[in-house]
Structure formats: structure tokens, C-alpha cells
Image: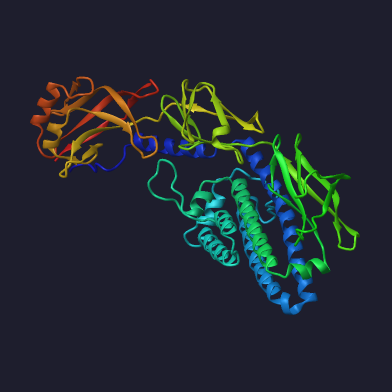
Amino acid sequence: MASNSSRLTPRQKMINLMYIVLTAMLALNVSSDVLDGFTQVHDGLNRTNSNVGLRNSAIYGQLGAFAEQNPDKGQAWLDKASDVRRATATLVAYVDSLKYEIVRRVDGKDADPDNIVNRDDLEAAAVVMLSPGNPRGTILRQRIDAYSDYVLSLLPDSTTRRTVGEALDTKAVTRRGTLTPQSWEESRFDQQPVVAAVTLLTKLQNDILYAEGEALSSLLSHVDAGDVRVNELNALVLPQSRMVMRGGKYSANILLAAVDTTARPLVFVEGKQLSNDRGLYEINTGSTGTFTYKGWLEVPHGDGTSTRHDFSSSYTVIEPMATVSATMMNVLYAGIENPVGISVPGVAMTDISATMTNGSLNRQGDHWVAKPATVGQDAVITVTATMDGRPVNVATTTFRVRKLPDPTPFIAFKDANGATDHYRGGRPFAKALLMQAQGLQAAIDDGLLDTPFNVLGFETVFFDSSGNAMPEVSDGANFSARQKQQFQRLSRGKRFYISRIRAVGPDGITRDLSPMEVIIN
């Protein structure tokens, strides 16, 4: 009775198990520095969300005051603003529930999204957001799309519509090196650490509050500005950027709501009058932290008098940060070109430079290619950005350099359609195709690394009628004449083995590959 050729040998089972364990260990290798960075960004976004929420409440309050003074003109706009506030609050609360659900999965019932204990867990976000039985990620995307359509219907300005639409965009993403687009939810929550997933959800809340603010501002612009200006004047501080990196510039417009262009106010900050009549306030930042400032606006009136309107605001300066990621895996492989993504928020790609130890790092358009040299020696990527005319070191990231995984040996042949195919053993193989084959090849062709290896040599082992093994040595990577003579004698159902396969890859390391069984059809 013939043996079951599809059953793995104990050795092959052990190899497969070791590969699975190694992959899991690599996936879990999340740097504590990266986790700390996500925590800092999450905290900063929470503060920003609070400030944006206060600004939106102020705009809503103006609509309420006008509606109270003039219900005929203002009530319709207030009702629309109330609908926007309810829709926003509902969506923000739903995102909060998702953050709690993700953190609770790793930290238990006492979980706190603002104080995550098991920050590096890579499964919780995917289980909560991508579960087939309860696809919360899909539901979230659908709710964001519905909210985006609703808010965009309230924005007549095309520039604002485009900005808000980009902030709430949930289109599928096609990653580098892949052909199939990945859904919005998979690109954000698959294999993400808990702290990263929670930070992404907090950033989403920031975008939702930003969209709410634009919608409320649009509704306010439709109200009779004269009535509001006569009855109530409010000083507003509108920063041009919600977060500033150390070394960058903080800019904010300080102005009156529904300002009269024929009587622009005088703006004083910390007792000093601004040098321009547009209310543009700028200050260079030199250290991190939250900073407050206050002042007042003097509004002249037609009778020669003026009124004073006080204001105060704050801004947060964060450390420069950059994103450096190996797009293939969590490590760099020696001897091959590893695609690396490098970006600095708020800085153009032309103003970013990077260097790497233990190898070379080259720019290819907006992308980078890292080629490490020595296995076992870390490669350190240093990113520098030019801000305000001077270089600033924004990130230093360390990667482990590994040798390439072992390739899989195969016999290349042409199928019935003339396309090249690979026979890897363990199943019947036509004798005619075997006789046409030149020899043995090897490659990593898993769709990720796709790296060819050079076969240095191998042996074929045949068995005579008495069960005696008859090894034959190859001619390098090609079948020798004696091996082909043995092929010619094989009949249907017979089998032989290819063993002692040696191959060398781009990393220059020679390795012995697992044997393969060839069954003649």
C-alpha cells in the first residue's frame, strides 16, 4: 500500500511550528519608545479635542443667543445646529465605546483608554473591530460615511467641503507591494497595538469635531451678522494649526465674530498691540508644553467711543515626531532592498533627509530603500527635517537586521497554457515535464519578500528493486547526465528524493534546504 504523500514528516511539522512561533515573536516586537510616542500623541489629541469642543460650543452659543433675540431669523439655524450637535455627540460617543471595548479586552473590566496597561497587544483591536460576527469596524466606517454626507450637505464652500471630505475619508487603501485594496478598517486596526488603535480612534474624534466646527461656522455665517454684532460681540482665537512641533511656528488669527470690515478692532496680546490689522498672532516655539496667552480687542464705534473685549487661549507644543516603518515586516533583511516609509507630519518630503548605519539608505521618489549589510548588527535610521530654514533631528529608530528565511526548492516547468509553474514535490509529476526540466531552483516567493536564491548543488536518491539507495550528484543547479538517465528508467508511481540541497541568497549566506519527494505520474 502506498503511503499518504500529503502527510508531513515530524521534521517538517517542527519547521512549520518554529516558523509560526518566529512570526508571532516578530509581530510582538513593538518598541516601547513607539508605544510611548503613541501615548503622548493620544494625550495631546485629547487636549486638542477638548479645546475644539469648547470652540464649537461657543459658536453654538452664538446661534442660541441670536435665536433668543430674534426667533424668526435665528430659530431655523439653531435647529440645524442642534441636529449637527446631536449627530456629532452620538458618533463621538460610539467611538468612545469602541476605545473602551478594545482596552477592556486586554485590561479587564477596570480598563481606562487614557491609561492603558497592556499597550502592545496586537490582537484586541482586530478582534473588536474586524470580527466577522460583529464587524464594528465596518459599522464605524458606514456611520462615518453617513455623518460625512450629512455635514458636507451643510457646507456650500467647495474648499471647506474638500477639506472636511478628506478628513473623514474612508476609502480603501492599496498598500505598496500589493494589488488588492485593503478596506479602511483593516488598514487601521489589523495587527495594530492597542495604544495605536486607541490613538487612531482619538484622532478620528478630532476630525469629527473639526467637521462639526466647520458645519456650525457655516450655519453661523448664514445668520444676519448685523443683528449678532449689535447685540453681542465675542473675541475668538482661531489657530492655523492645532498642534505645533518644537522648533516650528505657532500661528493664530484673533478676531471678532461677524467683524465689520469698516471698523477693524485693535488687537493687544500681553499688553502689546499687534503690528498688523488682520489679527494675525505669531510666536516662535522653543520648548514643549502647554502655553496660555491673553489680551483684548478694542472696537471703535461711530460716536468716537470704543469697547473692550477680553480673550484668552492656549496652544500645545509637542516634540518633533516622524514615522519610520519597514513596510515588509518588523525587521530589515540583509542583502536585499527593504522598502521603508519615512514621513514627518507637516513637513514636505523634499525637506526630509535620512541616514542609516550598517548599510545604505537611498531615496526613490517619496519612498526609501534600506539595504543592511551585516546580519545581527542593528541598523539605526536617523531622520532630519528642515523647518524654518534649519535642520532638526526628529527621530532615531533602531531596526534589527536578520538573515533571509530559507527559500523553497522547486522544479520549474511550463503548464498546458505555456505559463511557468513550480513543482515543489509531494504530489504526482508528469515524467515528460521532468525530462524537460533543466534542474533545481529555489526562491522565497511568498508574495512578500519574493527573493531568488542560487542553487549550488544537490543529490537525487533512487532505490533499486532491493531497496538499496542509489545517490547521484547534480551538475551544480542542473540535473547531471546520470540523473537524467535515472529519470528515463522511472515508471508511473515510482518516486525518488532530492536531498542535500545547498543554496545561497543575496545575503551571501549558504544554507541547507529541506529535501523534496518527487512522485512520477
Question: Is 355 left or right of 180, judged from the image as shown?
Answer: right
Provide residue 259's location: percent of width, then percent of height: 76, 60
Q: Is residue 379 visible?
A: no
Q: How many marks?
A: 0
Colouring method of the image? rainbow
Provide residue 166's location: percent of width, then percent of height: 55, 54
Provide residue 28's location: percent of width, then percent of height: 54, 39
Q: Is residue 142 visible?
A: yes
Give 409 or 86, whichever is nearer the viewer: 86
Viewport quadrant of the N terminus: top left
In the image, farthest residue toward the bottom: 72
Provide residue 267's location: percent of width, then percent of height: 83, 50
Give 472 or 96, whichever is nearer the viewer: 96
Give 440 or 414, whichever is nearer the viewer: 414
Question: Is 67 left or right of 438, judged from the image as shown?
Answer: right
Residue shown at 40% from the left, 40% from the top: 177
Question: Is 273 left or right of 454, judged from the image as shown?
Answer: right
Q: Splitting the image into 4 quarters, where does residue 513 fall?
A: top left
In the image, farthest residue toward the right: 305
Q: Is residue 417 above or below residue 475?
A: below
Q: Splitting the image into 4 quarters, where does residue 445 fall?
A: top left
Q: Splitting the image into 4 quarters, where does residue 213 fall?
A: bottom right
Residue shown at 44% from the left, 51% from the top: 182
Residue shown at 72% from the left, 44% from the top: 251
Give 22 or 256, whichever is nearer the viewer: 256
Question: Is 169 left or right of 393, judged from the image as shown?
Answer: left
Q: Is residue 457 above or below residue 233?
A: above
Viewport quadrant of the C terminus: top left
